[in-house]
């Protein structure tokens, strides 16, 4: 990468990048994924808190002789949190990084 | 009552502890030779891999409080412990999706670098470093006081001596070995903690014949059906939402966590490190769940409460019952190592706010030789270390449990909103950022002082002035609203112009250091 040199060269280069539809699409996709996953995490977490605060009986329900529904739900929230970060990383590695590379090539950055 | 050797000097614990100290001081010596420049001191030369940083991040987050405290909570309150652990974990996707990559692409050593990126650095760095230092100090007090009591309990050392030992060791790691030593101390401790907890869980499972149903059944026989379902921990829904917000967004505003993203070579590694960290922390909370239930069944609540009302000794007691003196000694040493590693990370983050943000950024206006930058960082480390020891001794015997909550509330209200708006919102201005940070900071501190936690529990007034235990909802909302209103009030054309360059650098990584 030619790093900062290329960028500081002219202000118009920056402006060109910003108005480029490819760049805008890139930003749009990233915002969609990152805001989407943040909201999904909040939904899962507050869904859980909502059950804990208002529907304790649901979580207290026995699903087997000894295990209440609350236990797999709580552990599930922990696992889903890990899965969400996994989804983001896989998406960014497989989709975002190559797109950034392709865009840089097209714009003449190394 | 069963006898325990906890509280008596345990030669095995002391041996393990000396081994750890010797190893970490060896690492510090090795790191010292590689810590000459500011980049090496603050960011380990940016040579840490994503996997290593993931372990170190997890290490920063898995404090002794979360190991001993949450295992204790599970053992005494059963299911309610899960509500806490879940809360501490859900902040990580937020860190990953909103903060990690722009932070890595835009900043140099601290998160205030990013908040100040296109704004007027003088005022921003002044208030941002205040937010960072307050977060670190409250977190540090909680850790130091916890450390003193724990070491006293486990090694029967006097409280002051324990605080002094912890303070001197952590200062030595940071002072001589900088971020490189701090990171490796953290990695070793994370491995020890995860390994020790895994062993303990295996012992529980062997004793329970690998049957969770049996373990849960025994727990309900002893403590009733309610042990497996939510109890009274979340009684006020608004309070629960407020606590949730502080935990979720506070993680994305903790200076010692954010600082770690500068130790990796690029945004891709930063991203990977959050994934690993989340995995390790999630796994760790599932382990503490089993440890807590195991302690409730195999040790019993009476004995746990007899040692420490808060349940902090649940895991060590369980280790003693299942693995004897040797395993107890090992686990006690691991708990001590955990404290040391976490306070070292905090000290480094606090010192960076003092030296990189305040001294270099504000007083020197960014112009200072490499040599004097490192010197400033080292002086700041000594100041922080001395402050931590003094505060640890000053707050002896005080109820400091609320201080971790306060640190998270300040992080979520003062540090996070301004950082996020600076990255995302073009019209954000210097005045907007300064007022947002100050609003979040003042609201978080004042609301907690007036809340039941401090006003009633500590100042012993009959009724609280503010009914909510957790200020997060109000202080965070206040910080966002004030930041937005002030920014809309008067625009800052220079900041808007520079946003374009910031955006390109943030998304494409062009020009990142």
Image: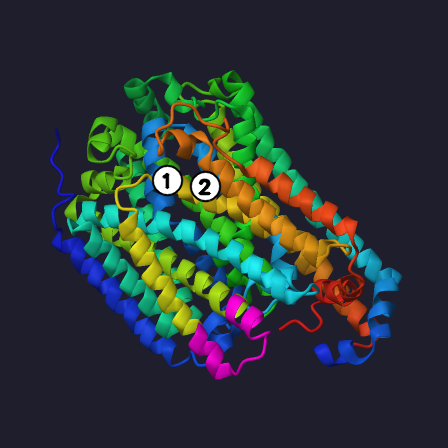
- The residue lying at 45 percent from left, 74 percent from top is B376
Q: Position of residue B30 (x, y in %)?
A: 35, 77
- Across and down, in percent, residue B16 comes to 21, 58
Q: How is the image coloured?
A: rainbow
The region drawn magenta spans: B358-376
Answer yes or no: do the residues labelled 2 and 1 have beta carbons within 8 Å?
Answer: yes
Q: Looking at the picture, does residue B468 appear above or below residue B483?
A: above
Left or right: where B138 falls relative to A40: left
* Circle 2 SS class: helix
* Viewer can see residue B82: yes
Residue named by callout 1: B401
Residue A87 is left or right of residue B295, and the answer is: right
In space, the residues marked 2 and 1 are separated at their CA atoms by: 8 Å
Q: Which residue is mark 2?
A: B405
Image coordinates of residue B228 in percent, x first then y, are: 40, 23
Chain bearing mark 2: B
Instruction: State whether residue B418 is above or below residue B298.
Output: below
Viewer-closest of A99 and B111: B111
Mark 1 burial class by Cα count in 10 Å: few <14, some 14-19, many 20+:
some
Residue B326 visible in the displayed image = no
Asked if residue B374 lies in the magenta stretch, the reply is: yes
Q: Which mark is residue A20?
A: none
Chain letter behind tag 1 = B
Q: Residue at x 55, y 52 (%)?
A: B253
> Magenta part mainly helix, strand or loop?
helix
Q: Nearer the viewer, residue A43 or B249?
A: B249
* Mark 1 residue element: helix
């Amino acid at each position: 990468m030619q790093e900062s040199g290329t960028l500081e060269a002219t202000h118009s280069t920056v402006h060109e990048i910003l108005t480029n539809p490819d760049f805008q699409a890139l930003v749009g996709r990233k915002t969609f994924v990152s805001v989407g996953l943040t909201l999904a995490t909040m939904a899962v977490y507050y869904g859980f808190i909502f059950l804990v605060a208002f529907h304790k009986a649901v979580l207290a329900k026995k699903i087997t002789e000894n295990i209440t529904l609350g236990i797999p739900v709580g552990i599930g929230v922990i696992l889903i949190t890990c899965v969400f970060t996994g989804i983001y990383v896989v998406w960014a590695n497989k989709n975002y990084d190559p797109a950034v590379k392709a865009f840089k090539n097209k714009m003449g950055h190394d | 009552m069963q006898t325990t050797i906890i509280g008596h000097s345990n030669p095995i614990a002391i041996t393990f502890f000396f081994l750890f100290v010797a190893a970490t001081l060896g690492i510090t010596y090795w790191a010292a030779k590689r810590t000459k420049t500011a980049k090496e001191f603050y960011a380990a030369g940016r040579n840490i891999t994503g996997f290593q940083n993931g372990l170190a991040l997890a290490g920063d987050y898995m404090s002794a409080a979360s190991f001993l405290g949450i295992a204790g909570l599970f053992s005494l309150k059963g299911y309610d412990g899960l509500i806490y652990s879940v809360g501490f974990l859900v902040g990580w996707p937020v860190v990953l999706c909103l903060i990690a990559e722009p932070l890595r692409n835009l900043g140099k050593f601290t998160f205030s670098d990013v908040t100040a990126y296109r704004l007027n650095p003088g005022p921003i760095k002044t208030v941002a470093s205040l937010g960072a230092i307050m977060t670190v100090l409250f977190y540090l007090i909680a850790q130091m006081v916890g450390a003193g009591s724990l070491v006293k309990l486990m090694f029967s050392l006097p409280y002051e001596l324990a605080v002094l030992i912890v303070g001197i060791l952590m200062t030595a790691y940071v002072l001589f070995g900088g971020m490189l030593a701090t990171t490796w101390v953290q990695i070793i401790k994370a491995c020890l903690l995860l390994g020790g907890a895994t062993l303990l869980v295996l012992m529980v499972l062997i004793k329970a014949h690998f049957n969770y149903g049996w373990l849960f059944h025994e727990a309900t026989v002893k403590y009733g059906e309610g042990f497996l379902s939510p109890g009274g921990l979340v009684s006020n829904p608004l309070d629960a939402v407020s606590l949730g917000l502080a935990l979720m967004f506070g993680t994305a505003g903790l200076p010692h966590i954010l600082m770690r993203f500068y130790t990796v070579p690029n945004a891709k590694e930063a991203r990977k490190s959050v994934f690993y960290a989340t995995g390790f922390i999630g796994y760790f909370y599932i382990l503490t769940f089993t440890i807590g239930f195991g302690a409730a069944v195999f040790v019993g609540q009476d004995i746990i409460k007899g040692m420490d009302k808060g349940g902090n000794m649940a895991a060590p007691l369980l280790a003693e019952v299942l693995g004897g003196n040797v395993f107890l000694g090992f686990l006690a040493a691991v708990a001590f190592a955990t404290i040391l590693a976490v306070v070292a990370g905090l000290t480094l983050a606090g010192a960076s706010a003092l030296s990189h943000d305040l001294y270099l950024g504000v007083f020197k206006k960014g112009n200072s030789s490499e040599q004097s930058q490192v010197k400033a960082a080292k002086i700041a480390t000594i100041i922080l270390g001395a402050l931590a020891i003094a505060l640890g001794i000053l707050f002896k015997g005080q109820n400091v449990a609320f201080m971790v909550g306060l640190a998270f509330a300040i992080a979520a209200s003062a540090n996070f909103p301004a950082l996020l708006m600076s990255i995302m919102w073009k019209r954000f201005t210097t005045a907007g950022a300064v007022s947002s940070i100050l609003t979040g900071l003042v609201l978080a501190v004042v609301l907690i002082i007036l809340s039941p936690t401090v006003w009633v529990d500590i100042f012993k007034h009959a009724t609280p002035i503010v009914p909510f235990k957790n200020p997060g909802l109000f202080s965070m909302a206040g910080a966002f609203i004030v930041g937005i209103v002030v920014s809309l009030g008067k625009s800052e054309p220079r900041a808007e112009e520079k946003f374009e360059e910031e955006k390109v650098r943030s998304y494409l990584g062009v020009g990142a250091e």
